[in-house]
Image (cartoon, grey):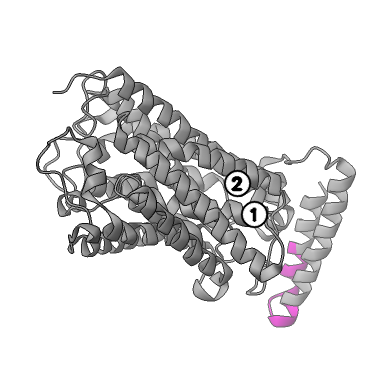
Amino acid sequence: MAALDPGDTAWTVVSAALVFLMCLGLGFFYGGLARSNHTLSLMFLMMVSTCVVSLQWYFWGYSLTFSETTNNSFIGNLHHIVARHIGREPHSNAPTIPSSTYFIYQCMFAVITPALAFGSTAERMKIGPVIIFLFIWSTLVYNICAMWVWNPLGWLAKLGVQDYAGGTTVHLTSGAAAGAYALLIGERRDYNKQSHFAPNNVAFVFLGTAMLWFGWFGFNGGSALAANARGMNAVVVTHLAGCVGGLVWVMIDYYNTKKWSLVGICTGAVAGLATITPAAGFVTASSSLAFGLFGALICHFCVANKNRLFPFDDCLDVFAVHYVSGIVGTLMTGIFSQQSVIALSYPEGAQNIPLGGWFDRHWIQVPVQLAAIGAITGWSFVVTYLTLWVMEKSGLKLRLRDDEELMGTDLAVLGETAYGFMNSHQIGSHNNQLVARIKDTTARRRSNATPNPNVLEAQEAAISESVDK
C-alpha cells in the first residue's frame, strides 16, 4: 500500500469543494434560463438534490458503487453501508488519499448528476415526488452505471472503457434520464413547436456559467485523485475545450442573427466542457481543441433543431447539450486518447501502461466506447421511465396542475418569488391575468370536446377562487 500523500489529499478535498460549487452554480444557470416565475424552484431543486443524494450516498450509494469485495460486475455489495470501513485506509482507486476523502469527492458527482436532469422538466414538474425519485434513481441508475465504469470490478471497466471524469456516468445518465422524464410528463401547457422562451435573467446564466467553469477544474482535474501531471493536464484541456466551445457557439449565433449573445457563449462553453469531460485524462492540449469545436457544433445543431429532432419538450436543453456532448466526447475519446497522456500518472519507466485509442492504433477502443454509450443510455432511459411510470400510477402526481403551472412553481409551490420588486399589487395583477388565461383555455377546451359543462364551470370557479386567495 502506498503511503498517504498530504498534497494529493488536499487537492482532492479542494476538488470536491469545486464540484459542490458546480451544484450551486447549476441553480443559477437553470434559474436564469427559465421564465421568471420558475426561477426559485430550480434553485430549490439543486439544494434538494444535494441533501437527498448525499444521504443516499452515505446510507448505501457509495457501497453499491465502489465496494471492493463484490462478487459480480453489475452492482456492488453493502460492505460500506452507512460509511462503514471508511476512514484512514485508502480505496484501491485512490491509494494515496484516505477513503473518507475519496468518499466525499465521489459524493459530489452523485449529487450533480440527477440535478442536471431537472432542467428538461422545468416549469411543469412537481417538487414533492422528486425526493422519492432521487433516492430510487440514484440507487438504480447512477450507482449501477458508475459501478460499471469506475469500479475496477465493473463489467465496462473490465472491457476497457475510457471515461476519465463522467462522460458516460454523469452526462449520459442524466441526459437519458432527462429525456425519459420529459417524455413521460409531457410538454409545457403553452409549448408548441414554434415556441421560443427567452431567459428571464441572463446575468444569472453568466454567474452560473462562471461557477460551473470554475468548478470544472476540480471536476476533471480532481479525477486524477492526486496532485500530479495527469491531473494538471486535465485542467489545461478542460479550459481550452471550454474556450473553443464558447467561441464557436457565439460565432454561429452571430452568423445567424448578427448579434453577439452572452447566453450563446455561456452555453457553448458548457458544451465544450461537457464534451471534454470523458477525455480530460487521455488527450493532449492540441486534441482538446477538437473536442470544443465538435462539441459546440453538434450541440448547437441539436439545440437549434430540438423541436423536430426530439419527441419531447426539452425545456432548458439538457438532452441537446449534456446527452449529446456525452456521446460526442465518449466517442472522440476512443479516437484521440493517447498512452503518453495516461503515462503522466505512472512512474517513469513503468510497464503495462494502458493503450489509448485510434491515435495509438488501438482500434478496439471505439467499439468499446460505443458499447458503453449503448448500455448506459438504454439502462438510464428505461429504468428512469419505468420508475416514474410506477410513481405516477401509485398516486404520486409528477406534474403541476394547470393553474399551478400558469402561476409558476415559485409562487404555487414555494410561496416565494425570485425578485423582490414583485409586490402584492403586481402579483394581484398577475393573478387576474392568470384567471383570464385559464378561462380562455377552458373555453377552447369546451369547443374542442364535449365534457359535462357543469363540471367545467365548477373547476373554473375553484381555480379562480384559489388563485384570488
Q: Amino acid at mark 1?
A: Val
Is disc 2 surrounded by few (<14), some (14 to 19) or many (20+) residues within 10 Å?
Answer: many
Give yes or no for residue 181 being in the magenta stretch.
Answer: no
Pick the front one: 459 or 122:
122
Q: Is residue 289 above or below residue 345?
A: below
The local crowd at label 1, few if under 14, some if 14 to 19, many if 20 or more residues have their Cα within 10 Å, is: many
Task: Compare residues 363 and 199 and report the one nearer the observer.
Answer: 363
- Which residue is painted at 23% across and 61% down in the image? 358
Given contact means CB atoms under 8 Å apart, are the residues at marks 1 and 2 in contact?
no
> Upstream in the sequence, badge 1 or badge 2?
2
Q: Please provide percent x and percent y for residue 459.
A: 73, 63
Span colored in magenta: 446-459
Name the residue rendered at 58%, 69% in the picture: 304
Please state the horizontal and vertical placement of residue 305, each as a whole percent of the image.
56, 72
Q: Which mark is residue 263?
A: 1
Q: Label 1: state its secondary structure.
A: helix
Residue 60 in view in this figure: no
Which residue in the protein does label 2 denote?
A: 29
Q: Is residue 334 left or right of residue 390?
A: left
The structure residue drawn at horizontal position 71% and vertical position 48%, both measured from the top left corner, is 201
Percent coordinates x, y for residue 291 in the rendering:
41, 57
456 or 416, nearer to the observer: 416
Q: Nearer the viewer, residue 357 or 427?
A: 357
Please state which amino acid type lies under the numbered disc 2: Phe
